[in-house]
Amino acid sequence: MEAIGVPWFVAVRQLGPPLFLLAAGGLLLWLRPPARPGPVVAALATNLVAAALPFLWIGLQTLTDQAEKTVYGLVMTLLQPSVATAAWLLLLWAATGPARRREEEPDTVSET
């Protein structure tokens, strides 16, 4: 992280809570699986990606030598909160949406 100009404590402060949320959410998914586990996993992963976006963005700018353009910072300022909001909306939908209906097997009546 120091190579791209970000102190380690900033990365830990920004990535720590989403990593903890991913670990705690994964444990809860394992212990008490919800009706829709797929969207919950996607929401937890999306939240982690949203937290990592600024660091990925800084790394990409450093690698491409585009760190001086402020318009890219504006894009990240709008993109990162949008991804985090999408993660929470996905989690909200997974938690409050109707459970998937299981296709019931047709009753087999044996005639004797």
Image (spheres, rainbow, N blue to C red):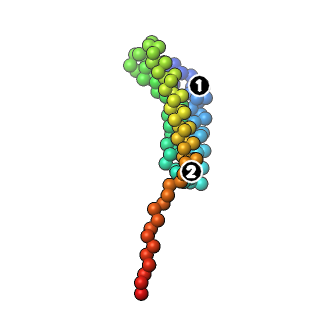
Q: Residue at x 42, y 87 (%)?
A: 112
Question: Callout 1: few (<14), some (14-19), or many (20+) C-alpha neighbours within 10 Å?
Answer: few
In the image, 64: left or right of 89?
A: left
**Residue 34 horizontal side relative to residue 104, left or right:** right
User: SS class of the residue under badge 2?
Assistant: helix
Instruction: Give the mark, 2 or 1, whose residue is nearer the N terminus.
Output: 1
Residue 106, quarter of the rendered image: bottom left
**83 relative to 35, above or below:** above
Kind of residue indicated by mark 1: Val
x 50%, y 55%: residue? 100
Residue 26: x and y in percent read 56, 47
Residue type, mark 2 in image: Leu
Q: Can you name the residue that lies furthest to the top here?
A: 68
Q: Residue at x 44, y 68 (%)?
A: 105
Nearer-the-camera pick, 54 or 34: 34
Say if 60 sits above or below 108 in the image: above
Label disc, if present, on residue 73 of the rendered structure:
none
Would you name the residue on which mark 1 appears?
A: 10
The picture places residue 104, in percent across and down from the top left corner, at 46, 65
